Image (spheres, helix red, strand yellow):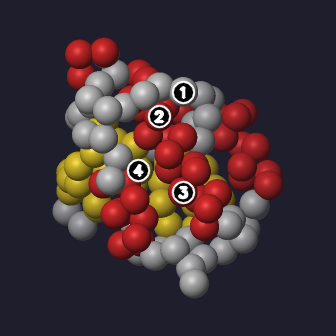
Amino acid sequence: MRLTGKELLEHCLAKPGAWQDEPWEGDVVAKVSEKIFAFLGDESVGIKCGANRDEADELVNAYPDDVGKMAYIGRSGWNTVRLGGAVPDDEILELVDASYTTVVGKLPKSRRPPGHTTQ
């Protein structure tokens, strides 16, 4: 069974302080505080995959047919990962978890959700 966009959204929303938003009509995102940690689609997810483009390119190089640099914010380490492709579901969930942790870690301590632990 392959991970669906709905299951991925549920995974995102189970994180401390996470909430669903639609900042642009038809574009669902998962946020913590006011910051996006996942752009959710039916067939892909956009996530923070590194502190910079070089780090994020490691994933692109590992899965060139299923991972690509996100438009507009890719230079900052964001990638689009295709669901149902070569990237294993458990790795996609780990990448979402890492994106969440990265985004929470950049929030001021006063805006970090209760129950979140930095790694």
Front position in the image: 117 or 96: 117
* Residue under label 4: 38
SS class of the residue under badge 1?
Answer: loop
Real-space CA distance between mark 2 and mark 3, rounded to the nearest whole angstrom: 12 Å
The mark that comes first in sequence, 4 or 3, is 4
Please give the label number shown on residue 74: none
Residue mark closest to the camera, 4 vs 2:
2
Vertical relation: 89 (above or below) 60: below
> Whole-Å distance between the Cαs marked 4 and 2?
11 Å
Query: What type is the residue that disc 3 sits on?
Result: Leu
Give the crowd class for mark 1: few <14, some 14-19, many >=20 residues within 10 Å: few
What amino acid type is highlighted by mark number 4? Ala
Gap between marks 2 and 1 measured at Cα = 8 Å
Q: Quadrant of the C terminus?
A: top right
Q: Position of residue 22 (x, y in %)?
A: 21, 56
Front position among marks 4 and 1: 1
| Residue farthest along the bottom direction in this orientation | 1
Mark 1 or mark 3: name the one nearer the start of the chain. 3
In this rendering, does residue 13 appear at all? Answer: yes
Asked whether disc 2 touches disc 1, contact meaning CB atoms under 8 Å apart, the reply is yes
Quadrant assignment for the N terminus: bottom right
What label does residue 101 carry, if any? 2
